[in-house]
Image: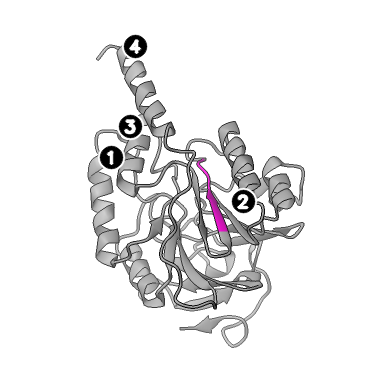
Amino acid sequence: MPCRARRFLEGALLAAVLLCVRQSVSAPHEPRDNSGFTFAIVGDRTGSAVPGVYEEVWREVNADHPDFVLTVGDIIEGGNDRTVHLEWEKALRILEASGHNTIFFTPGNHDVWSPISATAYVKYTKRPLHYSFDFREAHFTVLNNSQSDDLPSQEYDFLQHDLQEHAAAPVKFIVSHRPSWIYNAAFSNPAFPLHQFAQKYGVRYVISGHVHQMLHYKLDGVDYISEASSGGHLRLDKAYEKGWFFQHTIVQVRPGSVKFSIKEVSSPYGESRITSLDDWGPNGLAIEHDNSTNISKQ
């Protein structure tokens, strides 16, 4: 295909994908009582998936019986338009085997790298590239920074419009794959647009993946959270206390409170340690402690 024709086709595909991004997504079933709800966060499966880990994570997620599951991106290895459909079909077989029907996906850089991959992402996840949804008192905004370390301007436009429309929601979460906020949060710099929107509209939690490391920053009442891996390879020295481990996170939303439980995967991939969000800080575990104090076992 001539280069000009290929560029036209790719542009048309991307335009078709973007037609469906400015929308809200239907929420899952309502809880059975008024005591709140629980959802799970699953981290990256790829860059360089470790065999067996993702499947075990999903078995443990299902044992917790969350009302829905939120992923932070990187479900497939990606990078090749010719194999993208086969990769999604393989990944979805893992998710279908888990038996969980309600999954809210976030596009990662391994999921979306081209117009063809963006179209495949929407087809297989049945989610737009960015969207929002409500569940009881909570509002979730899912952003697309799959192809940029920074949030693109159209994502800020979507975020501002979405938060304006849902300003009354008492609990708000912003989710993206890449932690575009991480350098500002690390240097306690509040002068960046995402933080200013979060403060203006009362967003308490900003959640990302991508780096495969459990990190937690607090900035002006906003919790910035980097989720550890759920199957993507562990980097550097792979030390648990520095945030390098396989896990899923359970979030309990109750009237007036939100509680995070970070649950390390069980043997042979981990030691089933459970920590709270406040156990973690900008450099991994916030304080030195042993299994008899803040870290519990399943």
Density class for disc 4 (Cα within 10 Å; few <14, some 14-19, many ≥20) is few
- Relative image position of residue 16 (x, y in whole percent): 37, 29
36 vs 129, left or right, is right
What residue would you read off at disc 1?
Answer: 84
Q: Earlier in the sequence, mark 4 or mark 1?
A: 4
The residues tagged by marks 2 and 1 sit, at their Cα atoms, a distance apart of: 35 Å
Q: Earlier in the sequence, mark 2 or mark 1?
A: 1
Identified by mark 3, the residue type is Ile
Is residue 150 visible to the viewer in this orientation of the structure?
no
Q: Residue shown at 41%/49% (left/top)? A: 74
| Residue 295 quadrant | bottom right
Q: Please state the extent of the stretch shown in magenta in the rendering.
A: 139-144
Q: Residue shown at 66%/52% (left/top)? A: 167
Question: Can you say whether 185 is above or below 282 in the image?
Answer: above
Camera-side residue of 37 and 195: 37
The answer to whether residue 238 is magenta is: no
What residue would you read off at disc 2?
Answer: 166
Q: Are marks 2 and 4 in contact (CB under 8 Å)?
A: no
Q: Are marks 4 and 3 in contact (CB under 8 Å)?
A: no
What residue would you read off at disc 4?
Answer: 4
Identified by mark 2, the residue type is His
- Relative image position of residue 103 (x, y in whole percent): 39, 58
Hey, which residue is sitting farthest bottom in the picture?
A: 292
Q: Earlier in the sequence, mark 3 or mark 1?
A: 1
Question: Can you say whether 116 is above or below 286 in the image?
Answer: above
For mark 4, give the secondary structure: helix
Identified by mark 4, the residue type is Arg
